[in-house]
Amino acid sequence: MSTSLFRTKKIESILAEGSDTAHGAHGLKRVLSMKDLTFFGIAAILGAGSFSSLGGAVFHGGPGVVILFIITAVACAFTAFCYSEFASRIPVAGSAYTYAYASFGELFAWIIGWALIMEYSIGNIYVAYSWSDYFTSFLEKIGVHIPQYLCTSYMEVKHAMANGSTNPDVLEAFNKAPMIGSLKIIFDLPAFVINILITMLVYRGIKESRNFSNLMVILKMIVVGLVIIVGGYLVFSHGLTPNWTPANDVGVKSFMPNGFSGVMAAVSGVFFAYIGFDAVSVLAEESKNPQRDLPRGMILSLVICTVVYILLTLVLTGAVNYKNFEGVGDPLAFIFEKQNLNVGWMQFFVAIAAVIAMTSVLLVFQMGQPRIWMSMSRDGLMPPVFQKIHPIYKTPSFATIVTGLVVGIPILFTDKTFVLDFTSIATLFAFVLVCGGILLIPRKEKQAGKFHLPFINGQYIFPIIVIGSLFLAHKLSANYFADMFNFDFNANSEYAGGKLSFMDVATPNITLIIFWFSALLLAIITFIKKYSLIPLMGLITCMYLLTGMTKNNWAWFLGWLLIGLVIYLLYGYKKSNLAEK
């Protein structure tokens, strides 16, 4: 036993705790095949990102946001290989939390477990809001109206009114809301109800959830395919391809009208579109052959969804000028409205697809969080009740109910913008630690029937990539490093001509500076240690995506981690199974 904050668990111990026999008759059911895992991955990935946050991403980056989708897909692909390696070695529930416990130690394991609450639980709040938007839109199309004060979040209305909004939906919600004393009753009822229904389904069992998810994925892929085919045909037949090179504010036509900085401004929305592929690894204990099927299901679902996202982005930016997507929360339906492609029946189908898509995302995320808590409870970092398995349904029953409350209650007082940024930064942080964790565990011999991460010696390749990237950044933008440090080269400055004082450095891009310093340091360590290239690339690409997060994102995230650290020191550190008795 140990008193160290960085005490690690041996992989053999983790496997013993998560085996079929470790918990006797109270273990989880192994019923999921590779097809099921692939469908769960698609269900998690293809949802609110494509049907909601894609609109904002397109508005910031224009057609060039396709490049960010590719960059993000590459980062996720490298990360998926790292997840697959861990899943092959440690095929138990817990995902990145369990992997960090075996590589970085208990403190980092707790931090990841705490961060994953944001990915699965808080992320599901955003999905619930988006589901509500499309569901109420669908009801409107069939003549059913829900009062605005019952399908809008309180904080959304509060912020909009404070900013002098003239949006008729916001005004209706504010003016017609019933009162209790001086408090207006405004909340998103459909979002709250769907959370309850999904929680009940997940509580019932993995088999029922699997069948429901597979059906949702099939229907969703059919309708998304229809959007791509119909939308793509109309883009070419209507001669709208010039929309792929729109004019920017100074009249220059470009695939990236707002430059690469505009593309990077969309990182939260684009990355949110990929959140969920790692949720497949949480289902390891319910997989028939996790060492073989988990990696295949994860990577296959990622490839399929990347192709879909690129095609959807091209259809959207071809059908409508990117500037028209400002504030659009239902971009796939928007392109078929009267003022755009004018295909009314497609609007109806998209509304149905969105409801289906986001229902499946809610399901997968709602399944992921209880299994994280169950793993943390097994390790003593959370109360024992979180590892309680229902005697009939074979699901983590108490943890599932708590997850429903963690998602449901904040629905009453948060809004989409806050949740979107909060979720993306937490997930990227977890990805960074997973990729880094692979570098710290010893290589294993290849075994038949199990995934094996190919070893490519990064001793020379990785330093060349880092130095080459620095050179390329300077070549593409002569002021890249000046902008990073925010040097003032104004000709009117008394320090013009390159003579700078400390005061000329105003607000440097701290995250970008840290990124390049870390990249150079990692290149030096790799040259000495001969680290594997694939996890290195996953680590560095995810770190780069983190540089697109705002200072406000970082402030909230670090505050959340501080709260988690206090809880760990007060409870988990003392109750841990690895604590000195």
Image (cartoon, rainbow, N blue to C red):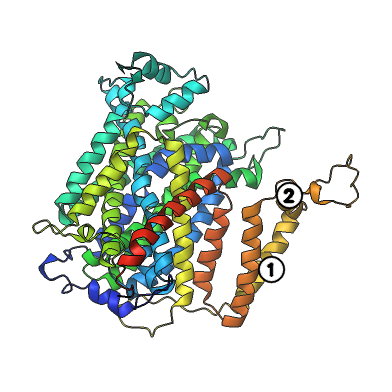
Please state if 516 lies on the left or on the right of 45 as rendered: right
Q: Secondary structure at mark 1?
A: helix
Residue found at x 46% / y 53%: 562
In the rendered picture of this protein, how many numbered marks are placed on residues? 2
Q: Residues within 10 Å of mark 1 (few under 14, many from 20)?
A: some
Q: Is residue 565 visible?
A: yes
Q: Are marks 1 and 2 in contact (CB under 8 Å)?
A: no
x, y (%) of residue 142? Answer: 25, 23
Q: Secondary structure at mark 2?
A: helix
Residue 53 x, y percent position in the rendering: 45, 40
Residue beneath disc 1: 467
Tell me what residue is drawn at x 35 percent, y 35 percent.
129
Residue carrying label 2: 483
Q: Residues within 10 Å of mark 2 (few under 14, many from 20)?
A: some
Indicate which disc, 1 or 2, sits on the residue closer to the N terminus. Answer: 1
Q: Position of residue 288 (x, y in %)?
A: 21, 68
Q: Quadrant of the C terminus?
A: bottom left
Looking at the image, which is closer to me, 192 or 538? Answer: 192
Q: Nearer the viewer, mark 1 or mark 2?
A: 2
Q: Is 16 displayed left or right of 245 in the figure?
A: left
Q: Answer whether residue 215 is visible to the viewer in this image.
A: no
| Depicted 461 relative to depicted 431: above or below | below
- Kind of residue sitting beneath label 1: Ile
Residue 551 is labelled as none
Quadrant of the rendered structure where residue 178 is? top left
